[in-house]
Amino acid sequence: MSNPTNAPAQPTWSGSNEQQTLAERAFNVMMLQSAFFPENVPVRQTVANLAAFIASQDGLDASALEATISAALEANSQIFRRIDDGERVVYATTRLGYYTEPQIDTRHTFAKRLHEPENPLPIDDLSVVITRTRPALTTIEPVFISDYWQQRSPTTGEEGEIINVAPISPSSDVELDETFEDEVEPVAVAPVVVAPAAVVEAPTPVVATNSTTLVLPGGAALDFAQSVEHILAAHGSTIQAALSEAIDNDPLRRIVAFGDEYFAEENIPTLSKGDLRRIREYIVEQGEPMPDTSILSDVYYRNPRDNDYVTFRFALNYRLNREKDFEFVGVQGARLWSAKGLPAVGTKRLKTSELGQFYSFLEETPHFDDSLKQTSPDDIKQNRQMSRFLSFFEWEYGVLPYDAAMKALLPQPLLPEQRTAILRIESPQHYSFYLAELRYPTANRGGWLHGLEDFFKEHLVPGALITLSATDDPSVWTLQYEETSGADVKLLQQDDKKGRYAFVKHTFYCDADNDLIASQERLPRLKNMKVLTPGERRRLATTAGYVLEQVGQPRPGDRAGFELSIDDLFLGVNVQRPATRSYLLGELAEEQDFFIEETAVIYFPPPEDETSVENKNFVEDDE
Amino acid sequence: MPIDVKSIRLGETGLERLIQWLRTSNQPQTLEAITAKYVEILRSLVVEEEGR
């Protein structure tokens, strides 16, 4: 057993007393010499040197002492090995107390441990291997394997491509050992008479294939002998889908995408924490989402003429999209970035969840979306503009629904998981602009555009005809209206403090549909109507019932009811919440308390106890 | 080693070469562009081997 302290062994000495003493002194000298030697590495010393050292200590003649020392060491030959190289005699021993041949331990060399792991991973392609450890930044760096393993891999070809090994066919030039082959005697087979089949099988479609034809999963044949253009024209979408899926499912993420662009992950520069901090501070300082081009020029001083401008721009977008402090709010052609710390865009008087629920009918029951009654999506796309009348709810909260007409006009999300886009709405008539947030629909919630509250309140009235038009910049839109001479009206206003509606004198200068203006002349009984809570407004029938009770004409009879024209009900309901005319009538038609006539709706409120229970539920919802 | 066309799996076979091309192109590409290049790679794998 080795000595962990590396102290030399204490051997047993032989010979006369004088020889034992001399041998021990020689051993001690050699142990001092080998103080830092491994225990099994020999230390060598000549007799002359030993004699000179001992003689100098004892004050004797060294030459006379050599013979005595030689004799003493020979008497302890189990400890000292005599080595005569022809010119001189050397005695050797080790710290173990005996001589042993030096052995080089190659089991733990650095090179061996680096290049030959004890249990290499089962990998197919040895040219690129990904580490299992996760780096600080979320990038996966490839680690190149040594030539040792690459040469030992039978399946690795050039550029790391896996080569399919052809199966050995019987016709291969393989010498078969015929020693074990037994001769098989021919067996006489009785002739079998097969009656002609009466049933004729239907011919199966056969795809003519040759050595360059690949049969796709759908059964179509892809012939690689044809030109690339021809293949793309015939099967481009199939190949594109397969390629896109393979890229998305690649665990190594070797190709990454941002929007409609793809790039090799290895070539994408990284952004440091300092970079991210500077970008965030820049966006917050600007006070609004900024395009990637502005970030590149103002933060990085990059010029579009730089050689790596396109690459770095992709890197910026790709890296920012993976950071939680940044949110992509751009569209195709205008990549805007918002950062944590920017003020929210849009109304704060309603929660986004409440607005999403109000507009959920646009997604859940799209047949109630009548925004395309007057025009078609193609016309909207071609003209790049659309016009519509504002409802009271839209005017009050500065919101526009993301209905079918708006979907035809406004840009679609660029990224699959994108929730919002920030649009700049300009008013050429007033030389002003407003930031509006486009909320894309989710699974069960509708989308909307909000942030226009100030513009609507300042320049428009409910019922105003507005026109939203595209510009050359995909993130900039213009909002216009027809200006008219001033008109005075007592307009319905929402008093948030009192939680009720009231009429206030108002002068407006825009073209508007008088039937949609919530004025005292139009529907005086809207005064003092309560602003329903979001929970109460969530259900359309409840909202309509409340409006009918407040605004409708009481009907005499056994069962007291309320009657209101469809136009008035439509106006009154849209004071409280958004609803299309078809949605309103479609929903009420399914309610047993409502009766829809040709031009009016009649409502019979349920008995008081049911109402109280229902109200209680709303209170619970709000809580 | 020749590549049997039957062994080709769309989206997998030749992907390494596509990645290599994307690296050397040194700029982002559209899905249409990389699809065209991918078809070109597959075609070269099959047709060139066929021509040998």
Image (spheres, grey):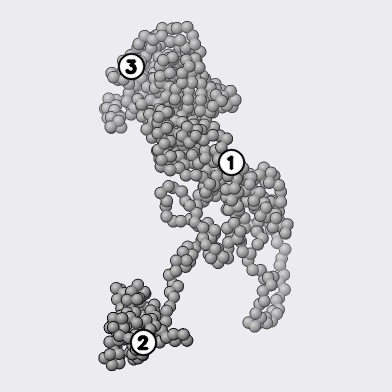
Residue at left 69%, top 79%?
A: A187
Q: Amino acid at mark 3?
A: Tyr
Counting from the top left corner in percent of width and height, residue A84 is at: 44, 86
The label nearer to you, 1 versus 2, is 2
Asked if both marks, 1 and 2, belong to the same chain, the answer given is no
Name the mark nearer the viewer: 3 or 1.
1
The chain to which mark 1 is attached is B
Q: Give coordinates of residue B27: x percent, y percent.
A: 57, 42
For residue A267, above or below residue A375: below
Q: Which residue is mark 3?
A: A501
Q: Amino acid at mark 2?
A: Ser
SS at mark 2? helix
User: Label 2: chain?
Assistant: A
For label 2, the crowd category at 10 Å Cα-Cα, with few meaning under 14, some 14 to 19 and many 20 or more, is few
Q: What chain does badge 3 belong to?
A: A
Could you tell me which residue is drawn at 70 percent across and 54 percent down? B47
Could you say which quadrant of the image residue A241 lies in? Answer: top right
Q: Which element is circle 3 on? A: strand
Spatial separation of the CA atoms under disc 1 and disc 2: 92 Å
Q: Amino acid at mark 1?
A: Thr
Identify the residue position indicated by label 1 in the image. Answer: B30
On the question of residue A450 being in view, the answer is: yes
Residue behind mark 2:
A63
Quarter of the picture containing the N terminus of chain A is: bottom left
Q: Is residue A331 visible?
A: no
**Vertical order, A500 against A161 (above or below):** above
Q: Residues within 10 Å of mark 3 (few under 14, many from 20)?
A: some
Residue A35 on image: x %, y %:
33, 74
Q: Residue at x 28, y 90 (%)?
A: A18
Residue A57 falls left or right of residue A463: left
